[in-house]
Image (cartoon, rainbow, N blue to C red):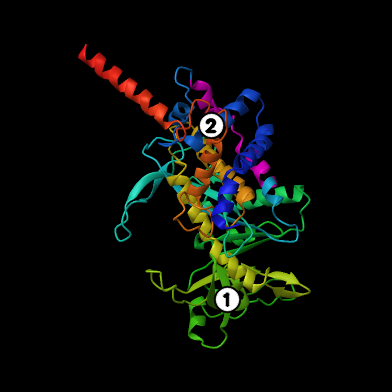
Amino acid sequence: MNKNNDSKERLGKPALLTELMHLISRCESAYGQKRVFNRVLALVMAELFAFGRHTITQLLLTLGIIDEDWSAWYRLFSHERFDEEQTSAVMLGEMLAEVEENDPFVVGADGFHVPRCSQAMPGTGWMKGLNTAKFKPGIQRGQRFVEGSWLTPIVNGYSRAIPIRCLSAFTAKSVPNAKDEPRTEVQACLAFLRWTRQQLDEAGREAQTVLTLNDGSYDTLEFWPGLPQNTVGVVRTARNRCLYYLPAVDAHGNCKYGEKAPAPHVWLKQRKGFTFQEVRVRGSLRRMRYRVEGPFVRDGLPGIPLFLIVIGGGKRPPQSRRKNYQPCFFLVSAVLRAGVWTLPLTIAELLAWLWQRWELEVAHRQMKSGLGLGEKQCWNDRSTVATVQWSVWVYALMMLSGYRAWGNDCGLGPPGLWYPTPQRWSFNTLWRGFRTEMWQQAEFRATWTWSRDNWLEKETLWSALFNATLASARV
């Protein structure tokens, strides 16, 4: 069976809706009343079929709720009817079922801004303008959040970032929010990691390692000592980061810095020591030049050994119009095994996962441009946070349903036989799949008639209506 036929066969089965309804029903325990859960279910369906802005008003109009009182729907967010933490715990349990206990549970955390217009909205503050030029950046109002995602196992060089939690990271200078205390982005990330580690321990997975991927903004003196037990970090670091060799311990047990190590960018000048590794990235093999140095300790953290991975630059594929790859540097938590400090995973696994951190950025773009994250007009202390968390949860529902129904890398054929089958399904393909499966339900299209076999009758009907319109116009 070719790919196009296989895609059509799978589109004919309501696998996406089955998985979606299963996930939503699993979250029913987070709601105390059945009617509240029914409103949540209705809003999720409205998110799938809203073609305009994803405000609460537009979602209710999508459901056809016009003459009713809308207050109960807004209370889902203003009165904390939507329990983000309990719902996230259910979603995390479903994700754990997709990962073997012997494999690391890979997560990633990254911050994002939600643009706002109001200067009195709780949690808002001044931030760098998102739509301004890089050579002349401006400022704008907005809220800061940190989103933690699960990265699905790599298949053919592809992975997916499926959100687990979304936490506020309002600055101390932002408008006070009675519900959420100000905290930095690093503090919000550590709160997410501690919560994730606790959920794994309660699920009986104390021995399973949590691997977190973070960008350079998390390479701080607060992040490394704040990692929970059995949690290792892979963080991008600066090219001039001050590192030292392992410190010597004196008779009193005090740690002292060892000799100063070369800065990360200095290792690029040494020709010897680099190794080549072929890594499959997005369906193709890429030859990477790297070297592993250490263990070192970071300036200000003499008691936490870290390895340094130096990745040399390289040329992009011939079809790419972008500039060549620039060198990059990463710090990795060292693990003590049999009295020797080693990498937490093999270097091939680490290099493969380093490519997948960009999926977090892809998820943020899809949530903002597709699901309208931040468009819901709710202004009090609770709803301004809950509506953002709601959009992140709906995106997680859709992506996890797609991952379970369609897999990770193989894509469904686009409409039309002349389009090639992509290497993996996109978010738009997933969204179209939900709508297609819903349209195939008999209850959904009860008033729709197929016109392929009776087009002559329909032509007669439209002609009669047209003549009647003309006659009424003459009168």
Q: Is residue 474 above or below residue 391?
A: above
| Principal secondary structure, stretch drawn in magenta | helix
Furthest residue toward left: 474
Q: Residues within 10 Å of mark 2 (few under 14, many from 20)?
A: some
Report the disc number at residue 278. 1
Report the disc number at residue 343. none
Which is more N-terminal, label 1 or label 2?
A: 2
Image position, residue 70 (x, y; %): 48, 22
Does any portion of residue 299 appear in the rendered image?
no
Report the disc number at residue 43. 2
Image position, residue 11 (x, y; %): 57, 45
Image position, residue 223 (x, y; %): 59, 59
What amino acid is labelled 1 in the image?
Answer: Glu
Quadrant into which the C terminus falls: top left
Image position, residue 242 (x, y; %): 53, 73
The residue closer to the viewer here, 289 or 283, is 283
Q: Which residues are magenta?
A: 70-93
Q: Is residue 457 above or below residue 285?
A: above
What amino acid is labelled 2 in the image?
Answer: Leu
Q: CA distance from mark 2 to mark 1?
A: 46 Å
Residue found at x 45% / y 30%: 454
Does any portion of residue 254 appear in the rendered image?
yes
Residue 28 falls within the magenta-colored stretch: no
Residue 86 falls within the magenta-colored stretch: yes
Quadrant into which the N terminus falls: bottom right
The residue closer to the viewer here, 135 or 171, is 135
Identify the secondary structure beneath mark 1: strand
Furthest residue toward front: 456
